[in-house]
Image (cartoon, grey):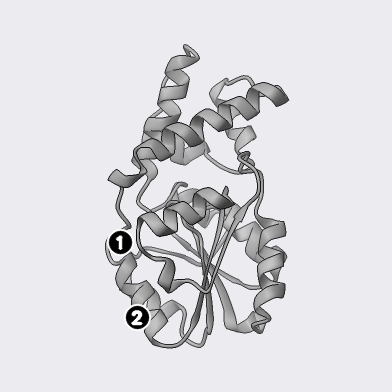
Amino acid sequence: MDSLHEHIKGKTHIIWDWNGTLLADIDHAVKTVNRILEEEKLPLTTVESYKSIFGFPVIEYYKKLGLPTEPNYFLGLCDRFNQYFHEELHKLELHPGARNILASIKAAGKTQSLLSASEHHRLLECVRTFKVESFFDHVYGIFDKTAASKVERGLELIRTTNTPKHKTVLIGDTDHDLEVGQAMGIEVILVEHGHQNPNRLRGVHKNVVKVL
């Protein structure tokens, strides 16, 4: 991931997505989804299929899988996903080179933030679990389990940091990260190694990079 340095020259505030971008959790996410699908007696998915249709809001992805999405049932599904996902979180790793680039950016005196569609207190747990809290000046998750959108939290973050927008960049792995960055009025870099197929990303954004 060190090759990202050339893409963030001149930036003083780097905003990172967490799942898929820094945390190598795609296989685990698919395993977790399949656990729910099995419980619901629905066909299982694959990593390839997951990357081709996963997106935000997550309720739309669940609909594509055939899962019930009535409000109360959907909230129950979200609870189950979060429980199952975090049960084995400690077995995961950051993507190769992620810790190094976080450390080098920190050493350069730049500001780093996390902006995730994960529930906020779960995100804080993750940061502590992987011992990366010292790298981040700001950690912003959302305040429910539905993974609908992080636009509002992104706008809050931009107001809080007060860094010039032309000096800020968002690095993520989904088309929603692009939507969030556009809403914030900042540059966006999408990485190939995350939760969506690179071809999908290239269909909506010109700045998609391979860093692994």
The quarter of the displayed image where residue 99 is located: bottom left
Please provide percent x and percent y for residue 120: 58, 52
The residue lying furthest to the top in this view is: 41
Residue 104: which numbered mark, if any? Answer: 2
Q: Is residue 17 visible?
A: yes
Please provide percent x and percent y for residue 150: 65, 54
| Side of 4 where 77 appears, left or right | right
Q: Residue at x 47, y 11 (%)?
A: 41
The kind of residue on which mark 2 rests is Ser
Please provide percent x and percent y for residue 182: 68, 65
Query: Which is more toward the observer, 41 or 136?
Result: 136
| Side of 207 where 27 appears, left or right | left
Depicted 193 relative to depicted 168: above or below: above
Q: Is residue 43 visible?
A: no
The kind of residue on which mark 1 rests is Leu
Q: CA distance from mark 2 to mark 1?
A: 17 Å
The quarter of the displayed image where residue 22 is located: bottom left
Q: Residues within 10 Å of mark 2 (few under 14, many from 20)?
A: some
Circle 1 residue: 212
Badge 2 marks a residue whose secondary structure is helix
